Image (tube, rainbow, N blue to C red):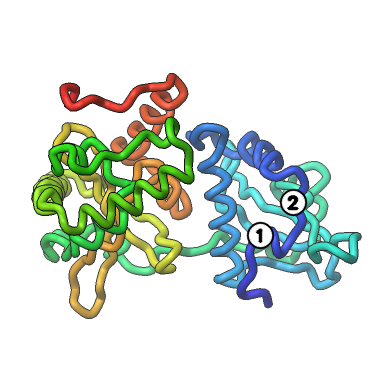
Amino acid sequence: MIRCMRLFDFAFVPNYPEPLDRLKALAANEHWGKGGRMLRSYFNHMFDKVIEDGLLSIHPDGQSAVFHTGLLTRSNQDIYAVFVPNERDDAQDWFFRGFSTSDGLGLGDILQRYDELPVRPRFITRAEQAFYAPQSGLPECAWLGLLEENVSRIPRQLIHDATEDRILLPDLREVGKDAYMDCLEEAARRLRDDEGMDLLVQWFEAALDRALDLLHMDYKLAVPAWHAKGKCVALMLPLQVRQRDTNVVLAVKWDAQKEYYVGINLLTMEMAYNNARLIARPEASWLVEGNQVRSKRVNEGHRPLARSDR
């Protein structure tokens, strides 16, 4: 049984990511981001989880391999990814054939050869991973480390305001990726010793207090998500840092021994949707609508908000 392998090591996927257009068309309609990039992230991480959990099924005759994509059609049929042996000796062992339901034409015939088709990976194993336990109080957050390690995920206007423009981050679209990454490293180093860090911590703590207040009124605000680096389920809390709408997402993990939550990461809205989608189709309005608004602004060339706009 295969236990550790990435998608492109396992199989040759011709013209990737074009095959995902078929998956998008086959699955129930939902928001997958500009150019379907959220679907690419979803599919790659779902394959990782399938391999980790041993849920890739290879037929006894060795002529096919399949796994559950975790997605359903509009009529609630399971969608599977189908592979066949690669005819090339100098390439991966498997070749990606496509997506299908068990009664689909063509590839459905392959699926019908299986006595039992694989199930979807299981992520949530305990209640605290699905719903925030309010009796645990505020999560423990090492804000200095979270902020320093995630400078790129903090709205840059917040950094500008907190440091009174001592630390300025450029627009990625204007300077390019390499220059932007250099600026991030420099900003993280300087922020560590800048008095503006204390102000940022105060703003984030206030936003977290507000999020917990709202959570007491609506438990659905906390959204389960898969934290791939830690191979664990996290709950995502929407933070409204100095504005009315969510602009940063805090991921927290349940510590079973200490019986409270611990902050493990900061995420952008798109990252939050990606991580949540692995577990289930998100329904929280702050996450779904927030990503749709963000995509619309990017597509329209929306400018970053100026200080006076905030």
Residue drawn at the location 60% of the way across and 59% of the way down? 47
Q: Is residue 253 left or right of residue 288?
A: left
Residue 264, x across and y down, in percent? 29, 63
133 shown above or below 81: below
Which label number is shown at residue 267?
none
Q: Mark 1 belongs to which amino acid?
A: Leu
Residue drawn at the location 87% of the way across and 64% of the way down? 90
Label 1 environment density (alpha carbons within 10 Å; few <14, some 14–19, many ≥20): some
Which label number is shown at residue 7?
1
CB atoms of marks 1 and 2 within 8 Å: yes
307 shown above or below 270: above
Q: Which residue is mark 2?
A: 13
Residue drawn at the location 82% of the way across and 59% of the way down? 84
Local SS, label 2: loop
Label 2 environment density (alpha carbons within 10 Å; few <14, some 14–19, many ≥20): some
Estimate the spatial distance between the alpha carbons at disc 1 and disc 2, rounded to whole Å: 9 Å
| Quadrant where the image shows the C terminus | top left
Residue drawn at the location 47% of the way across and 53% of the way down? 278
Residue 1, x across and y down, in percent? 68, 77
30 shown above or below 207: above
Residue 17, x across and y down, in percent? 67, 43
Residue 191 seen in the figure: yes
